Image (spheres, rainbow, N blue to C red):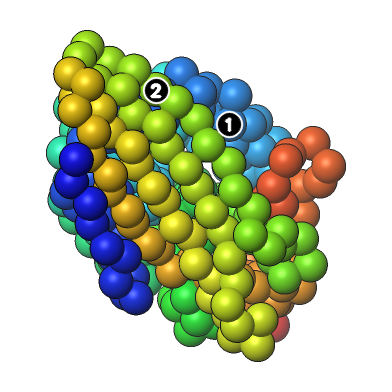
Amino acid sequence: MERRTLPQADQRRMYGDLAWTWPIISAKENYIEEAEGFVAAIRQYSRIEARMLLHLGPGGGHLDWTLKQHFQITAVDLSEAMLFLARRLNPEVTYLHGDMRTVRLGQLFDAVMVADSINYMLTPDDMRAAFATAFEHLKPGGVFCTYAEFTPEGFQQNKTQCSSHSAVGLDIAFFENYYDPDPTDTTFESVFVFLIRCNGKLTIETDRHLCGLFSLQTCRETLEGVGFEVTLLKPEWEANVLVGVKPARPSP
C-alpha cells in the first residue's frame, strides 16, 4: 500500500497526474441533464440565433458530449491532461489551451458558458477577468451562462460525500470534502481522497484544490459591471445559474 501526504498547496492533481481517473469516477452520461439545462437557458435568453458556442473550462468534455448535438463548439481549458481526454471524447469540438481570464481568440460567438470551472476564480479580479473574456467574445444579443455554485450564504462547512466506481481490474472509492478555514477570505478548500485498487492492490491518493467563495450579489454585480444584463435562474437549478445577455447597443 502506498501513501501520499497532503501538502498545504493548491495541487489540482485531478487536472494533472490523476486526470486518468476522471472518466471512471464521473461518467459522461451523468452530465446530460445539466447540459440540456444550459441548452434551454441559452435558447430562452439569447436574442440571436445560437449556433456557435464558446465553452471556457470544459475539463474532460463531459458536458460537450451533449452540447455538441446543439452547437458548434470551441472550448478553452488550462489543463493539457483534461484537454487530452476531451479531444478523445469529442473529436468534433475545437479544443484550445488557454486561461479563461486572459485568452483572446479574435472571434465572436453566439453564446459563451463557464460551468463549475468558474469555481477556480479565487479573487474578485479573477472573476471579473473571466466574465470580461466572455463579454468580449460574445456577439451583441448573445448570452453567457455561468454558475454561482458556492456562496458564503449556502456553504456547508465540512460537507463530505463519497462514491464508488469500477472499471476492468480497477475499483475507486472517491471522497470529497469542502472546508473553509478562513471565512474572512474568498476561498475554501476542496479536498479529494482516492482509494484506488488495481487488481486488489491499494493505493491512496490525495488532492487539494483552492476554490473561490463569493456572494451571489458579488457575482451578479461583477457581471453587471462588465456590461451584462443579468438574470438569476432559480429554483429550477440545484445551483445558482446566472445568465448574462450582451446588450445589442452599448449602454449610454
Circle 1: residue type: Glu
Residue drawn at 34 percent across, 75 percent down: 8
Q: Tell me the number on the disc at residue 2.
A: none
* Residue holding disc 1: 34
Give residue 246's position: percent from left, percent from top.
59, 61
* Residue holding disc 2: 165
Residue drawn at 83 percent across, 42 percent down: 235
Does 51 sit above or below residue 187?
above
- Relative placement, left or right, of 140 versus 108 is right
At label 2, counting other C-alpha atoms closer than 10 Å, the crowd grade (few under 14, some 14-19, many 20 or more) is some
> What is the quadrant of residue 86 in the picture?
top left
- Relative placement, left or right, of 58 versus 127 is left
Q: Does any portion of residue 178 appear in the rendered image?
A: yes
Count of picture labels: 2
At label 1, counting other C-alpha atoms closer than 10 Å, the crowd grade (few under 14, some 14-19, many 20 or more) is some
Of the 4 image quadrants, the one containing the C terminus is: bottom right
- Relative placement, left or right, of 216 versus 198 is right
> What is the quadrant of residue 140 in the picture?
bottom right
Give residue 187's position: percent from left, percent from top.
54, 75
Could you give the CA–CA distance between mark 2 and mark 1, rounded to whole angstroms?
21 Å
Give residue 51's position: percent from left, percent from top.
45, 33
